[in-house]
Image (cartoon, helix red, strand yellow):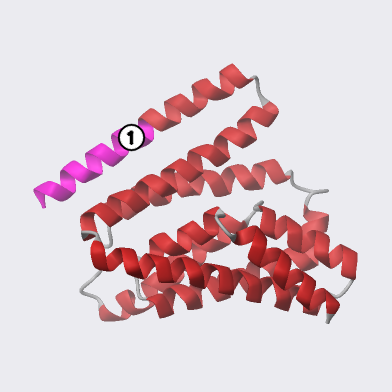
Amino acid sequence: MVAFIASFIFVVLAEMGDKTQLLAMAFATRYSAGKVLVAVFLATILNHAFAVVAGYFLTTVISMDVISFIAAFSFIIFGLWTIKGDKLKEDKKESRFGPIVTVGVAFFLAEMGDKTQLATVSLAIEYRNMVNVLMGTTLGMVIADAIGIVIGIVLRKHIPEKAIKWGSAVIFVLFGLNGVYKVLSSRLNIIFAGGIILFISLCAAYGMYYLIKINRKQ
């Protein structure tokens, strides 16, 4: 029980203001709160189960920097995808399950190398109780992200849909650039890393401009 309570409290506090909570907030402006919450739960329990069982050994095989880089870069791609939008809205089956898959994948990737995933690994090692740690960290993530979802719902009622979509895209891209920079700056010269980030930023900015231009024509 101590492991469960400690894991729950730690993750709730760690998740406040974290990128995954802000991600929940952004998704809640586009999809129903129920679907976002289900996706958060599924992605979290899978990700943290992975962290509890294999996370500790993963760092001895694959560098966590590589994992963090891939996850961060995926945020940039997802930001562009957000502007592009979903063209399968007429397909009822696809629109029903699409949001859960979309949000779930984004959350799973966002948690890879994140502090809450690494905290789950540490908690599992410290308490040696995988089940209670998994339950505690998962519940903590769901509660913290539910707060973000509520905020997202409020924003959706007062801000135009296009502004929300473009704002969400910018948030995703900025998180991605920040994550990529952190990985590169830890491995490369700061000036060289900054140059790469500048190049990626310009490419992302052009991509966003191009997609917004296309959407306006449509």
Q: Quadrant of residue 72?
A: top right
- Label tally: 1
Q: Quadrant of residue 101?
A: bottom left
* Residue 167 against residue 128 in the figure, above or below: above
Determine if residue 76 is in view.
Answer: yes
Q: Residue at x 44, y 31 (%)?
A: 200
Q: Position of residue 166 (x, y in %)?
A: 29, 49
State left or right for residue 87 relative to residue 167.
Answer: left
Q: Main secondary structure of the magenta part?
A: helix
State left or right for residue 167 relative to residue 217.
Answer: right
Q: Which residues are magenta?
A: 203-218
* Residue 148 against residue 60 in the figure, above or below: below
From the viewer's side, name the closer residue of 99 and 5.
Answer: 5
Location of the N terminus by quadrant is bottom right
For the residue marked with disc 1, what is the amino acid?
Answer: Ala
Q: Residue at x 65, y 48 (%)?
A: 67
Judge the density around disc 1: few (<14), some (14-19), many (≥20) Cα neighbours within 10 Å. Answer: some
State left or right for residue 13 relative to residue 131.
Answer: left
* Residue 200 against residue 54 in the figure, above or below: above
Q: Residue at x 66, y 24 (%)?
A: 188
Q: Residue at x 17, y 50 (%)?
A: 215
For mark 1, what is the residue?
205
Q: Position of residue 145 (x, y in %)?
A: 53, 68
State left or right for residue 122 relative to residue 181.
Answer: right
